[in-house]
Amino acid sequence: METPLKNSEGQKIQELCRKYSIYTWSIQQDVDPLAVAKTEGLYYWDYDGRRYLDFTSQLVNVNIGFNHPKVVEAMVEQARKMPFIAPKYAFDKRAELSRLLIEEIAPKNMAKVLFSLAGADANEFALRIAKAYTGREKIFTKYWDYHGSTYGAAMMNGEAIKPSPLPEIGGFIKFFGPFPFHDRSFASAEEASAFYLRDLRNRLIFEGADKVAAIIIEPVTGSNGVIIPPKSFLHGLRSLCDEFGILLVFDEVMMGFGRTGRWFAAEYFDVQPDIITFAKGITCGYVPLGGVLISRKIADYLETNRISCGLTYNAHPMGCAAAIATINVYKEEKILEHTREMAVVLEAELQKIKVKHPSVGDVRSIGLMGGIEIVKNAKTLEPFVPYGITNPGEAMNAFVNAAKLKGVSMFGRGNIAVVAPPLIIKEDELKEALAVVDDALGEVDARME
Ligand SMILES: Cc1ncc(COP(=O)(O)O)c(C=O)c1O
């Protein structure tokens, strides 16, 4: 529940938004959207002048913070010069952005990029390309991972109880990967990794590995729990794909563009997928842009085989201009290096929080992506909401609301609170925000068994 608005302008805006527009992922009668008056850097403000530190970078996308003047300037310039040109043309910003991505940013095996508008459609394109290239139909995806809410992407989602569009499309098969905090029966993460790889290999054989086009995963499961696999699991996936001629696709919509302290998680884990999808951090949401990176062999295939899909706004000039400016900000402000430094602080502070609060069963982080997993019982580690449920329960809501009342906004999924600040956050700001989180966890401690 948001705090009631006192300011009448904010109230009017909220009422009109509620009355005439639909809010996604919601039952309309329950929505109570905060009216946001302005944004700047790490913060947004409501119409009562209250300031919130955005501790999840909105939807883990505003990596360079709000309103960066260089990106805004690039957008204004592009809007004046050429706000739109159809995808079939060549133009300067598309040329420069494609070159930057392939020559400087993507893993070395990537040869070309197909620009989309966002994450879900990037994944739809990846599906189409993988099926066309391999001539195979089946797609394997991992439980817990999220890939988007368009029809095809939703078929890939691995949430336990998901509101799937009906009828479901056949040929999408799920498998489990390691979830270290919940794999407590294994002696080590490596043992868990080997188990899940064996299980997946068996599934591939039983489904007919020669019918499988791609294994599509989030290298680190983001919003559904910050699940960080051991490196051996991702290397094992690469080997399985090589063994059976299957394409390995990393959905890096959330991890790409710096979240792990590298351009891509593929680099962090030292694995070369055949396809990488991205969105979010490439423009930090200033304008929508996503894309699909494809390796040389797939690019060669597309030289002589028609790609039979496209959108009016593929390679949109506003998106390309914003992306170049955003990438320049990452480079000039050494944001990846800074993220790696802040990652050490985040990890250490989260550990302190875990030691202090009996309700914190686990903390984990990679780069500036952290998760705090709450439990009802410190001995048995019984969760507050049942395993697999991604809706937050009462304890999580109380925790998140307490932090928000103290000016730190974050979101909880099931039992896991996500901590993913803009990558520009400084050490003192990070520690201050975590002190608020620490304090707000008292709400969870108080609700334990
Ligand atoms: C890993 C991942 N893939 C895909 C998507 C879908 O992206 P979009 O909402 O831009 O369509 C998201 C969104 O959160 C995501 O985190």
Image (cartoon, rainbow, N blue to C red):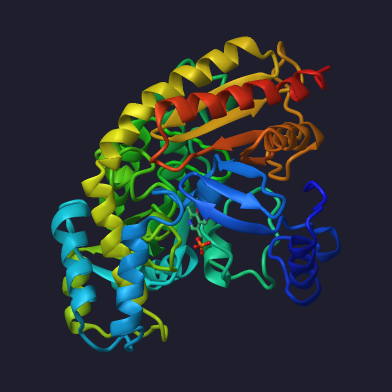
Residue 302 seen: yes
Residue 61 to residue 180: above or below: below
Q: Residue at x 48, y 48 (%)?
A: 203
Residue 80's spot in the image, x, y percent? 33, 82
Q: Residue at x 74, y 37 (%)?
A: 401
**Frontmost residue, 247 versus 112:** 112
280, above or below 405, in the image: below
Q: Position of residue 29 (x, y in %)?
A: 86, 63
| Position of the C terminus by quadrant | top right
Q: 201 and 33: which one is in front? A: 33
Residue 233 horizontal/vertical position (percent): 37, 35
Residue at left offset 18%, top offset 69%? 96
Q: Residue at x 66, y 14 (%)?
A: 357
Is residue 115 something one can see in this rendering? no
Vertical arrangement, residue 30 with respect to residue 255, above or below: below
Left or right of residue 359, residue 425 in this image: left
| Along the line of sight, the residue nearer the viewer: 267 or 286 | 286
Quadrant location of residue 167?
bottom right
Q: Looking at the picture, does residue 274 appear above or below residue 407?
A: below
Q: Nearer the viewer, residue 350 or 15?
A: 15
Instruction: Determine the residue located farthest toward the right in the rendered image.
Output: 29
- In this rendering, the count of numbered labels is 0
Taking the image as shown, residue 134 lies to the left or right of residue 419, namely: left
